[in-house]
């Protein structure tokens, strides 16, 4: 929980964007406790856990193994990780990719599929993406897609193409506010496509103002608190977007939605 220092209101906090660490093989090389201590330090109650998204080199492991590792960490800490999402290797082809996603959702209980195309060496609008996104829609889970600024592989215009092709799929754009210009683009995109949500991962400090503009233009209901946390190395020392949201002049219901409620609905977290 975090407390608004002005109003005294308390808010539950769910971070939709935390990665297991690159290079951990099939079992986390790092203990999970330091991550949980970090969450406690900043009042982050829970996180959605993504598999590692880096290149694995000589220690390459299968997407199935990465997904099983993610599901195991979630199962071991049910109070702290609200759910996990899956990794899929585009290079494996459509049939194998669809099987991986199917197993991850129906057998492992993962509640979404994540892509970080620049780490996969593929364009965001890779030819297999529409089919895999439609599978996500069929399974009732969101597709989480990184659009980190300055990566042409993950350019926003490529995401726009996918959104136009897959209107039935709920898409969460990760790291969309990672530059001020791109944050402006994300507002326009979310205004055009009602199936697009945005997280606040990797948000640069001067993009804080775009949160208000997103809400005024689109809706507070399609913003999600996320931090893009890796632990090797740690990608931040304090979760800046949390403080941008808590200090914004917003109705309490909007803050509660951005910080946890929207994500609980989006991922279908049981009991909420
Ligand atoms: Zn990420």
Image (cartoon, rainbow, N blue to C red):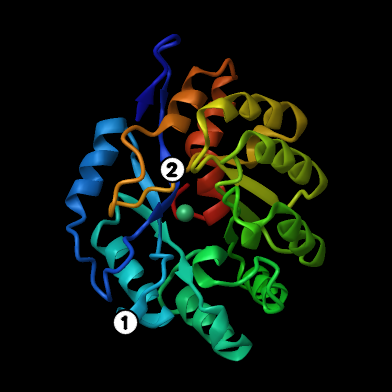
User: Above or below — where is 75 with respect to 204?
Assistant: below
Q: Is residue 31 left or right of residue 141?
A: left
Q: Residue at x 48, y 35 (%)?
A: 259
Viewer-closest of 235 and 172: 235
Residue sticking out furthest to the bottom: 95
Q: Nearer the viewer, residue 202 or 71?
A: 202
Question: Residue 35: x percent and y percent?
Answer: 25, 48
At 50% across and 43% down in the image, what residue appears? 201
Q: State which tag comes first along the sequence, 1 or 2.
A: 1
CB of residue at label 1: within 8 Å of ligand 1? no
Horizontal side of 69 relative to 165 (left or right) equals left
CA separation in Å, label 1 and label 2:
29 Å
**Which label is found at residue 248?**
none
Q: Does 244 appear above or below 103?
A: above
Q: Are marks 1 and 2 in contact (CB under 8 Å)?
A: no
Q: Residue furthest top?
A: 6
Q: Is residue 114 above or below residue 127?
A: above
Residue 227 numbered tag: 2
Q: Tell us which disc is closer to us: 1 or 2.
A: 1
Helix, strand or loop at label 2? It is loop
Residue 228, image x and y in percent? Answer: 43, 48
Q: In terms of image quadrants, where is residue 153? A: bottom right
Q: Which mark is residue 58?
A: 1
In the picture shown, does residue 79 fall above or below 223?
below
Secondary structure type for disc 1? helix
Q: Residues within 10 Å of mark 2 (few under 14, many from 20)?
A: many
x and y percent of residue 176 in the render?
A: 61, 45
Can residue 113 be seen in the rendering of this structure? no
Q: Could one spot residue 185 in this view of the protein?
A: yes
Q: Position of residue 237 (x, y in %)?
A: 31, 35
Q: Is residue 38 left or right of residue 204?
A: left
Q: Residue at x 76, y 48 (%)?
A: 194
């Amino acid at each position: 929980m975090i407390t608004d220092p002005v109003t005294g209101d308390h808010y539950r906090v769910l971070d939709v964007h935390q990665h297991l660490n690159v290079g951990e093989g099939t079992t986390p090389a790092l203990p999970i406790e330091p991550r949980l201590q970090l969450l406690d330090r900043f009042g982050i109650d829970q996180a959605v856990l993504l598999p590692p998204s880096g290149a694995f080199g000589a220690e390459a492991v299968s997407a199935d193994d990465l997904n099983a590792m993610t599901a195991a960490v979630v199962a071991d800490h049910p109070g702290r990780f609200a759910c996990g999402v899956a990794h899929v290797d585009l290079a494996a082809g459509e049939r194998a990719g669809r099987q991986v996603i199917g197993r991850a959702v129906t057998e492992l209980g993962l509640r979404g599929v994540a892509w970080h195309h620049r780490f996969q060496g593929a364009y965001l609008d890779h030819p297999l993406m529409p089919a895999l996104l439609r599978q996500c829609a069929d399974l009732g889970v969101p597709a989480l897609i990184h659009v980190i600024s300055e990566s042409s592989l993950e350019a926003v215009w490529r995401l726009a193409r996918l959104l136009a092709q897959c209107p039935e799929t709920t898409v969460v754009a990760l790291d969309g506010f990672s530059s001020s210009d791109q944050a402006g683009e994300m507002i326009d995109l979310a205004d055009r496509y009602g199936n697009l949500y945005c997280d606040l991962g990797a948000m640069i400090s001067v993009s804080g103002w775009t949160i208000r503009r997103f809400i005024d233009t689109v809706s507070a209901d399609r913003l999600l608190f996320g931090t893009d946390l890796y632990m090797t190395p740690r990608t931040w020392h304090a979760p800046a977007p949390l403080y941008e949201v808590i200090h914004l002049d917003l109705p309490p219901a909007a803050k509660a939605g951005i910080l946890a409620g929207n994500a609980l609905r989006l991922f279908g977290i049981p009991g909420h």
